[in-house]
Amino acid sequence: RAFTDADAIWRGIMLMVEKNPEIAIVTDSEGLLDDLKAMNEAFTVIERSLNAYLDSKKLAFPRFFFLSNDELIEILSETKEPLNVQPFVKKCFEAVKELVFSEDGGGT
């Protein structure tokens, strides 16, 4: 919810810029500085929450520590398509190049 709110504010600001690309006019808009400060605070809280979530996943499966946060997010977003995690197998498991999945969803 916090991200959606901050994103809506950002999109509103960008719409103002699109309608009037003269930066001096846009930056004089009432409440712009307050909106930018609020978004900055919101994104800081969002980032902390995301990092805490990713850390909990790393603690549950320590091999995730070998991945960047961006890679871990990509893996977690692909839970319904396990074949899409192949590019990360080498980073998680030494001497394992790829996983082979059977048609019935099982693996070898």
Image: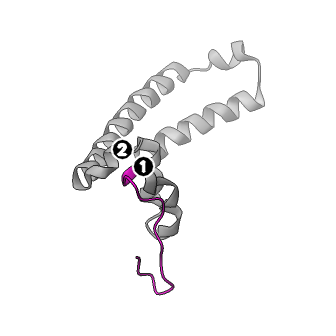
Residue situated furthest left in the rendering: 59
Q: Closer to the camera, 50 or 33?
A: 50
Q: Is residue 71 magenta?
A: no
Residue 60 locus on image (x, y percent): 23, 55
Kindly identify which residue carries mark 1: 91
Indicate the position of residue 94 as horizontal and vertical percent values.
37, 52
Q: State the residue lying farthest toward the front.
A: 95
SS assignment for the magenta stretch, majority: loop
Q: Which mark is residue 73?
A: none
How did the renderer colour the structure? one colour
Judged left or right of residue 15, residue 56 is left
Quadrant, the C terminus: bottom left
Of helix, strand and loop, which one carries label 1? helix
First reached walking from the N terminus: tag 1 or tag 2: 2
Q: Position of residue 74 (x, y in %)?
A: 48, 53
Three-letter code, disc 2: Phe
- Residue 18 sits in quarter: top right
Residue 102 is one of the magenta-drawn residues: yes
Taking the spot 42% from the left edge, 59% from the top edge, the residue there is: 96
Q: Which mark is residue 66?
A: 2
Query: What type is the residue that disc 1 sits on?
Result: Lys
Mark 2 surroundings within 10 Å by alpha-carbon count, few (fewer than 14), some (14 through 19), many (20 or more): some
Q: Position of residue 41 (x, y in %)?
A: 39, 28
Which residue corresponds to the image point at 63% horizontal and 16% vertical from the top-left?
27
Which segment did they paint magenta?
91-108
